[in-house]
Image (tube, rainbow, N blue to C red):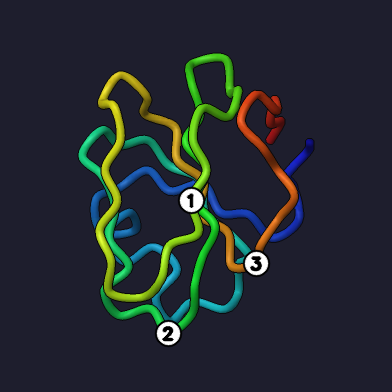
Amino acid sequence: MILNKKIKFTTNLLDKTIGLIGNHEFNGIVFKTRFGIHTFGLKETITVLILDKNKKVVKTKYLDPNSLFFWNPKYFWVIELRKKVQIKVGDKISF
């Protein structure tokens, strides 16, 4: 699957911390982290994809507002999407 419409690549700590909170300019964000994510401040459920170094999906999660999500720290690519998508573990993502 190719993600390229209104996806923001984040590289700094502030952008990663804020994520999709209050930013409706983008449908999703892509960033690297090994520490997990939160949805504090969000008002809607998001789709979270965790990718391996080859950008293959290793974990998917629909994450409700005010939640925490942790995964195996050997994976560091994270994609947060505003809508539910039909992506499953094993799918390869291009962006």
Where residue 49 appears, as percent x and y from the top left, is 52, 43
Kind of residue sitting beneath label 3: Lys
Kind of residue sitting beneath label 1: Lys
Q: Is residue 73 above or below residue 3?
A: above
Q: Is residue 33 left or right of residue 29?
A: left
Looking at the picture, tell me which residue is in the foreground, 79 or 46. 46
Q: Earlier in the sequence, mark 1 or mark 3?
A: 1
- CA gap between label 3 and label 2 equals 13 Å
The structure residue drawn at horizontal position 37% and vertical position 43%, both measured from the top left corner, is 11
Kindly state the secondary structure of the residue where label 2 is placed. Answer: loop
- CA gap between label 1 and label 2 equals 16 Å
Q: Which residue is mark 1?
A: 61
Q: Which residue is mark 3?
A: 83
Kindly state the secondary structure of the residue where label 1 is placed. Answer: strand
Q: Is residue 17 above or below residue 12?
A: below
Looking at the picture, tell me which residue is in the foreground, 69 or 10. 69
Kind of residue sitting beneath label 2: Lys
Quadrant position of the N terminus in the picture: top right
